[in-house]
Image: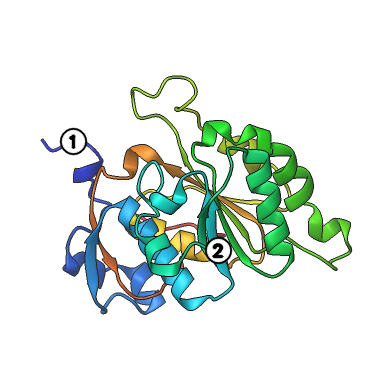
């Protein structure tokens, strides 16, 4: 018996599976070109697509210029330059605050917190500033252009500072949206939606899934809805 994520029947491992996906058919990308990707590569593809199509987009965080710890941003600094993909100091609070400021000035602001375990110094910025900025200013200002990406959860050998799943802390905050993808196809489509959503969004990426499985991912631009459940098996 095949066990593990790589053998899940929920994955779109073949072109035929993509063609038959009702969700991708609805989005108009089921019949287009696909490429085999793992989740890390799909995230990279979404970031590259965003930087290509949105001149205001910037990607920043600790070590993202050389590709990041998990290599999700590899090649982007070479392709788009150091003014759009750049490293920051080791300060999660500063990364979040800088991202809020960039978003408030009209940029598509894509920040990376290197590990979700270290997002807590940025908690005040995200909960008391990003989430409340629109309400506090009477809709005069907002940080809706902010997306925070962060690798989360356990991999089996990360210890207590590289294994945490803090998404529940943020899921209860009005003004923030929280996203957790399950596969490569989902990761690309949900990240594209998170980046373009008019609200600040935090994407927790289960790092154990980065290279656990591959799917045939549509090459075209597509967005999966953030506020609608994915129907994996229709009920009676």
- Crowd around label 2: few <14 · some 14–19 · many ≥20 (10 Å): many
Q: Quadrant of the C terminus?
A: bottom left
- Residue at 65% of width from left, 54% of height from top? 99
With 137 as the anchor, is 122 left or right in this view? left
The number of callouts visible is 2
Residue toward you, 61 or 108: 61
Label 2 secondary element: strand
Residue 109 picture quarter: bottom right
With 42 as the anchor, is 170 left or right in this view? right
Picture coordinates of residue 44, whole percent (x, y):
37, 59
Q: Can residue 193 be seen in the rendering of this structure? A: yes
With 116 as the anchor, is 32 left or right in this view? left
* N-terminal label among 1 and 2: 1
In the picture shown, does residue 24 fall above or below 137?
below
Residue 169 picture quarter: top right
Q: What's the distance in space between the residues labelled 1 and 2, CA to CA?
A: 39 Å
For the residues labelled 1 and 2, say whether their Cβ atoms are less than 8 Å apart. Answer: no
Residue 45 picture quarter: bottom left
Picture coordinates of residue 119, whole percent (x, y):
60, 36
Q: Which residue is mark 2?
A: 58
Q: Quadrant of the N terminus?
A: top left
Picture coordinates of residue 50, whole percent (x, y):
47, 70
Q: Can residue 131 be seen in the rendering of this structure? A: no
With 77 as the anchor, is 172 left or right in this view? right
Q: Which residue is mark 1?
A: 3
Nearer mark to the viewer, of 1 and 2 = 2
- Residue at 27% of width from left, 79% of height from top? 32
Residue toward you, 173 or 1: 173
Instruction: List the single residue furthest toward the top.
Output: 159
- Residue at 26% of width from left, 54% of height from top? 11
Picture coordinates of residue 176, whole percent (x, y):
67, 51
- Residue at 49% of width from left, 62% of height from top? 82
């Amino acid at each position: 018996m095949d066990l593990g994520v790589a053998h899940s029947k929920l994955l779109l491992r073949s072109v035929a599976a993509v063609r038959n996906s009702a969700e991708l058919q609805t989005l108009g990308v089921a019949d287009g070109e696909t490429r085999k990707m793992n989740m890390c590569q799909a995230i990279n593809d979404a970031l590259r697509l965003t930087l290509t199509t949105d001149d205001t987009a910037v990607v920043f965080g600790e070590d993202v210029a050389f590709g990041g710890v998990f290599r999700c941003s590899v090649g982007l600094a070479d392709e788009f330059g150091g003014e759009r993909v750049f490293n920051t100091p080791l300060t999660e609070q500063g990364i979040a605050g800088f991202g809020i400021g960039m978003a408030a000035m009209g940029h598509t602001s894509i920040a990376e917190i290197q590990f979700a375990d270290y997002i807590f110094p940025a908690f005040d910025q995200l909960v008391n500033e990003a989430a409340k900025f629109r309400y506090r200013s009477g809709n005069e200002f907002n940080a809706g252009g902010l997306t925070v990406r962060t690798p989360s959860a356990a991999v089996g050998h990360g210890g207590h500072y590289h294994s945490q799943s803090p998404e529940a802390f943020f899921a209860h905050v009005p003004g923030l949206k929280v996203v957790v993808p399950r596969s490569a196809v989902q990761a690309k489509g949900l990240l594209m939606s998170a980046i373009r959503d008019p609200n600040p969004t935090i994407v927790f990426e289960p790092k154990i899934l980065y290279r656990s499985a591959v799917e045939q991912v549509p090459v075209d631009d597509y967005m999966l809805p953030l506020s609608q459940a994915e129907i994996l098996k229709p009920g009676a």
